[in-house]
Amino acid sequence: MPCNPLTDSQGCLDEGAGGLTHALGTGVSSVASSAWESVGRSFAEAAVSLLTEFAEAFVAFPQIDPRDAGIRSVYGISLGIAAVAGRWEAHAGDDGPWPRAAGLVTGETSGAARPEAVFLYYNPKDTGAFECAAMFDDGAHGDGAADDGVFGAEIPPQPAGTRVRYYVEARASAQAGTTTFHPARAEFECLSYRVRARPRAGFPVRINETAAEAARGDDKAHRGWIELVNTSEAAVDLGGMYLSDDLENPRKWRFPAGAAVAPRGFLLIEAGEDAPAGTGLRADFKISTRGEALVLTDRDDCGNDELDRVVWGAISNGASWGRLPDGEGVFRPLVPTPGAENAAARAQ
C-alpha cells in the first residue's frame, strides 16, 4: 500500500529515497557500457541527495491535518495608527509653521500590539529621498504623557514657502513582522504643510508702485516694473532679501548682493524673464494685467519675515497701481511714475 505523506511523512521519506535510488541506479546500470556512465551516476547521487534534504525539511514541519479547511492565523497581531497631527507656532489663519519654528508631528497608535518603533519620514523637496527621524512616547517630545500610545518628533525649521511632505510608520516586534503606515499609500500620498512667513511691521522699504507689460504705439514691448521706496533717512541694503508675485513661494526672486535703496529714494526693478541683461535689477517673473500680488521677504538667516505685501486688481493698458501717498497709502490705480513720487494730481 502506498504511504500517506500526511500521516506517515517519515515512512514516505524512507520509501521515496530508496525507490529513487533503485530507479536511478537501474537506469544508470543499463548504460554502464556507454561513455555517459560516470555522468549518470553523478547525476543520480546528486538527485538523491537533494530529494533527501527536501524530504527531511518537510518532515520537520508540524503534522498537517488534511481535514483542516486552511490556515486560521499566523500571528494574532493588531497594530495601527489612529491619527497623525501636526502642531506648530503660526500666524493666525496659517496652516503651517513659521520659518524659525520646527514642525511637531504626533502619531497615536492603536491596536492590541504596542509598536516596537515609530518613525517620522519627511521631505522638504518635491523629489528625492525622505529623511527619517525616530518618534518617542516618553513625555519629552511633545507627545503628551509617557507610554500613552502617542509618539512625537520634530521636523527641523525650513525656509518660507517650503512645502514639507511627511508620513509615519509604526513597526511591531521583529517576530511579528508587522508594520503600518499613515497615510496608507505613503510615499505616494503624504501629509503636508507649507512654511508661512511671519508678518513684521516697521520695515522702511515698501512696495510703492507697479505696472504690467503693455504695448506701445510703435509695437515694441513695454516691460512691467516694480518700484520700491525707502521711507527712512538711511540707506537700506536689500541684498539676500526676496521679492515674489507668488504668496505660496515668497522666495521666488532674490536681490543680488549690493542692491540697496538710497535714503528717501526709489528703486526700480524690471519684471520679466526676457528683459535684456545689463539693464539693472530684473526679477524673473512678470506682472499680470489681470491682477497680482507682491510680497517682500527678509533674508534666510533673518527668519524670512514678511516685510511688505500688496494685492491689487486688473491693470488697464498704460496704467499702474501704487500707494498714495508714497509708502503709506493703500494700493490704487495711478498714472505710471516709475522712479518718481506718486502725485495725487496724476492719479486722475
Image (cartoon, rainbow, N blue to C red):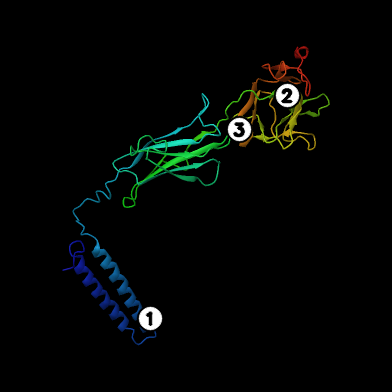
Instruction: Determine whether 68 is above or below 286 in the image.
Output: below
Instruction: Determine whether 229 is above or below 40 in the image.
Output: above
Q: Nearer the viewer, mark 1 or mark 2?
A: 2
Q: Which of marks 1 and 3 is in front?
A: 3
The quadrant in which the N terminus is found is: bottom left
Q: Which is more N-terminal, label 2 or label 1?
A: 1
Instruction: Determine whether 48 is above or below 200 in the image.
Output: below
Q: Which is more N-terminal, label 3 or label 1?
A: 1
Q: Is mark 1 on a helix, strand or loop?
A: helix
Q: Please give the residue where the numbered disc 1 appears in the rendered image.
A: 39
Image coordinates for residue 299, horizontal then vertical, percent: 64, 34
Q: Please give the residue where the numbered disc 2 appears in the rendered image.
A: 229
Q: Which residue is drawn at 46% across and 36% down?
A: 104
Q: Please give the residue where the numbered disc 3 appears in the rendered image.
A: 304
**How many angstroms separate mark 2 from mark 3 (CA)?**
20 Å
Q: What element carries label 3?
A: loop
Residue kind at label 1, given as amino acid type:
Val
Image coordinates for residue 176, horizontal then vertical, percent: 31, 50
* Residue situated in front as seen by the camera: 15 or 200: 200
In the picture, the disc for residue 262 is: none
Residue kind at label 2, given as amino acid type:
Val
Q: 328 left or right of 4? A: right
Mark 2 neighbour density, 10 Å: few (under 14) some (14–19) many (20 or more) = many
Q: Which residue is drawn at 24% across and 61% down?
A: 61
**How many angstroms separate mark 1 from mark 3 (CA)?**
79 Å
